[in-house]
Every structure is written in C-alpha cells, then in structure tokens.
Image (cartoon, rainbow, N blue to C red):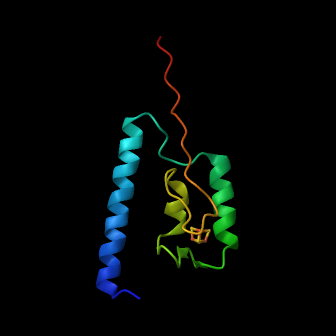
C-alpha cells in the first residue's frame, strides 16, 4: 500500500499520461470521447463491478464517470477496452 502522497503523485502522473495520450489521438484524428454504445456498456460494467466504490474504482482510484467517458481509457481488470474511432471528416462545401 502506497503512502497517500505517493498515491497522489501516481494518480497525477497517470492523469497527465492519459491527457497526453488523448491529445495525441485527437491530433491524429481520433475521437477522444467514448461514443454512446460503448459508453453504455462501460457504465454497466462499472455499475456491476465489486471494485466500484461509490463511483471510484478501487484498483486505479479513478472516478468511473470520467474514466468511462474518455475513449482511450481502459478497465484495469480488462472488463472494457480502449475505443479507437476516427472522427468523421467534414464535407467540403
Ligand atoms: S474500471 Fe473496471 S475495475 Fe474499475 S470499477 Fe470499472 S469495471 Fe471495475
């Protein structure tokens, strides 16, 4: 078990890495928010998961509401995975 300050540093680092990953994916033309169907699946998995501690994952300590919303996040238990979907290009007028 990590000391609280080390756990906070680890969580901040994971958040930073996740934001960089999502910005890079956005730059490459991928969706960074989870589409409706996989989002519903993720929400259902987290809602039924015994490691969901009132909206916070006991394993990664993330808030499940934000974790499921970000397309490139994944469940630490492997119950749901990253979603790679290219953004639709706007039609030239
Ligand atoms: S992210 Fe995975 S392990 Fe964490 S609460 Fe959701 S389903 Fe459970």
Judge whether 20 appears above or below 2 on screen: above
Quadrant for residue 80, please give it: bottom right
User: Residue 62 location in percent, x, y?
Assistant: 47, 70
- Residues 66 and 22: in front is 22
Residue drawn at x 49%, y 24% is: 89
Judge whether 60 appears above or below 92 on screen: below
Judge whether 78 appears above or below 84 on screen: below
Quadrant for residue 68, please give it: bottom right
Q: How many labels does the image show?
A: 0
Q: Judge left or right: residue 47 versus residue 92.
A: right
- Residues 33 and 30: in front is 30
Q: Judge left or right: residue 51 versus residue 61.
A: right
Q: Judge left or right: residue 89 versus residue 16.
A: right
User: Residue 31 location in percent, x, y?
Assistant: 49, 40
- Of the 4 image quadrants, the one containing the N terminus is bottom left
User: Residue 45 location in percent, x, y?
Assistant: 68, 65
Residue reaching furthest to the top: 93
Residue drawn at x 29%, y 83% is: 5
Q: Judge left or right: residue 37 versus residue 62.
A: right
Residue drawn at x 56%, y 47% is: 83
User: Residue 17 location in percent, x, y?
Assistant: 35, 58
Judge whether 62 appears above or below 4 on screen: above
Residue drawn at x 47%, y 45% is: 32
Quadrant hosting ligand 1: bottom right
């Amino acid at each position: 078990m990590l000391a609280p300050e080390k756990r906070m540093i680890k969580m901040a680092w994971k958040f930073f890495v996740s934001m960089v990953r999502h910005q890079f994916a956005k730059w490459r033309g991928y969706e960074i928010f989870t589409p409706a169907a996989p989002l519903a699946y993720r929400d259902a998995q987290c809602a039924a998961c015994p490691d969901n501690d009132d909206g916070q994952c006991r394993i990664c300590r993330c808030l499940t509401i934000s974790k499921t919303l970000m397309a490139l996040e994944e469940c630490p238990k492997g119950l749901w995975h990253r979603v790679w979907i290219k953004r639709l290009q706007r039609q030239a007028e």
